[in-house]
């Protein structure tokens, strides 16, 4: 297949590109600077600019563009950037697709389990209601843009959890744990919907040739609490897991970002993805952490 990717230089994009090329697929990257060859196409989502001929000969599009939600604090200006970077990138793609002579057969659009909000005690499937907090609002708007792709294009929204990777959401925690200061974040019993970087990319590769459409949860099959994940990191680094960070301290320091990123409780089910034949390489958070720190 010939696959067009936005965000191919990011954390997930880099691993996805590696797996696709290893499988013999051809990857074309969307870039915001002048292209340097046939494997790059220039676009500018800030101005909704993309030549519809970019889709000539393209079998599938994977859209991973969006400002990092891990960049803190979430100022008013940065909240706007989080929203606009996702909506504009997706709108740029779907607008150009509708003008293309031959639209791509598949659009896999990044999304997030943040759409569900804080839901302690529930098992969250793709049919679960949306939340009402900031991240849920962002994801709802983001997915609405993806649904504007041409009717002939199969659209999948990749509702991803916490990606376990050295450069991912855990990056700020690693030096703290290395110093022996790791411990519970708030209660520590809140369920974190995790997935290894390897399995995140592998799930996207699987969905390229699947028949699934609509939202698909991508989260590891074994639920894990925040304590489970951070304790696994401490164990792998042979450091103690002792020093708690009270919820009030986290909320004071990070405000809504703490509530929606670190303290949110989400037991997300990936049963739909697994029923489609996908098999996770890392089935527990401990396995994912060991792979991450290998």
Image (cartoon, helix red, strand yellow):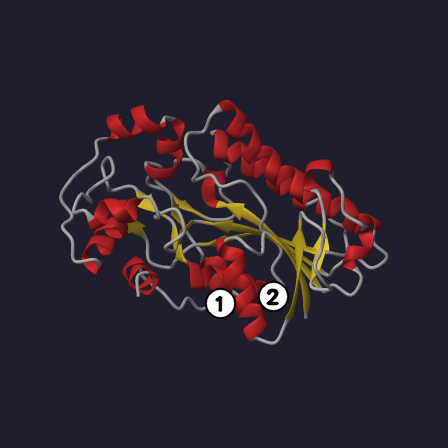
Label 1 SS = loop
Q: How far apart are marks 2 and 1 (CA)?
A: 10 Å
Taking the image as drawn, is residue 171 in sight?
yes
Pick whichever, 239 or 121, lies toward us: 239
185 or 72, nearer to the observer: 72
Above or below, comparing residue 100 to residue 71 in the picture:
below
Mark 1 nearby-residue class (10 Å; few <14, some 14–19, many ≥20) = some
Judge whether residue 132 can be spotted in this image. no
Looking at the image, which residue is at 54% across and 46% down?
Answer: 111
* Residue appearing at x 45%, y 56% in the figure: 270
Which residue is tagged 1? 278
Residue marked by disc 2: 210
For mark 2, does the 10 Å Cα neighbourhood hold few (<14), some (14 to 19), or many (20 or more) residues? Answer: some
- Image quadrant where one finds the C terminus: bottom left
Q: Is residue 248 left or right of residue 151?
A: left
Residue at coordinates 49% horizontally, 41% vertically from top-left?
Answer: 68
The percent position of residue 6, horizontal first and vertical second, equals 63, 52
Q: Where is residue 273 in the image (x, y as percent from the top left)?
A: 50, 60
Q: Nearer the viewer, residue 40 or 3?
A: 40
Q: Is residue 16 left or right of residue 234?
A: right
- Left/right of residue 204 with respect to residue 179 in the rendered view: right
Please provide percent x and percent y for residue 231. Answer: 21, 51
Q: In which quarter of the image is residue 184?
A: top left
Mark 2 or mark 1: which comes first in sequence? Answer: 2
Quarter of the rendering occupied by the N terminus? bottom right
Q: Which residue lies furthest to the right in this view?
A: 101
Residue 89 in the figure: left or right of residue 135: right
Q: Where is residue 189 in the image (x, y as percent from the top left)?
A: 24, 42
Q: In front here: 16 or 42?
A: 42
Helix, strand or loop for disc 2: loop
């Amino acid at each position: 297949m010939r696959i067009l990717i936005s965000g191919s230089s990011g954390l997930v994009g880099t691993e996805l590109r590696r797996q696709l090329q290893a499988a013999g697929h051809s990857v074309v990257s969307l870039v915001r600077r002048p292209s340097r060859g046939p494997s790059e196409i220039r676009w500018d989502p800030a101005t909704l600019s993309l030549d519809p001929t970019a889709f000539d000969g393209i079998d599938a599009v994977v859209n991973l563009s969006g400002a990092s939600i891990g960049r803190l604090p979430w100022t008013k200006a940065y909240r706007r950037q989080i929203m606009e970077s996702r909506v504009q990138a997706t709108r740029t793609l779907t607008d150009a697709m509708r003008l293309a002579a031959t639209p791509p057969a598949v659009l896999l659009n990044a999304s997030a389990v943040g759409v569900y909000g804080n839901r302690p005690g529930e098992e969250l499937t793709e049919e679960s209601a949306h939340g009402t907090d900031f991240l849920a609002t962002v994801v709802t708007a983001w997915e609405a843009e993806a649904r504007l792709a041409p009717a002939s294009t199969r659209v999948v929204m990749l509702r991803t959890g916490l990606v376990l990777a050295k450069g991912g959401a855990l990056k700020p925690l690693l030096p703290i744990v290395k110093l022996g200061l790791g411990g519970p974040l708030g209660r520590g019993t809140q369920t974190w919907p995790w997935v290894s970087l390897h399995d995140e990319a592998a799930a996207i590769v699987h969905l390229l040739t699947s028949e699934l459409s609509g939202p698909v949860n991508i989260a590891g099959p074994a639920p894990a609490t925040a304590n489970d994940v951070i304790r696994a990191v401490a164990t792998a680094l042979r450091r103690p897991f002792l020093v708690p960070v009270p919820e009030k301290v986290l909320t004071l320091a990070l405000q809504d970002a703490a509530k929606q990123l670190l303290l949110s409780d989400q037991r997300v089910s990936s049963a739909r993805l697994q029923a489609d034949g996908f098999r996770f390489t890392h089935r527990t958070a401990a396995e994912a952490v060991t792979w991450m720190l290998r």
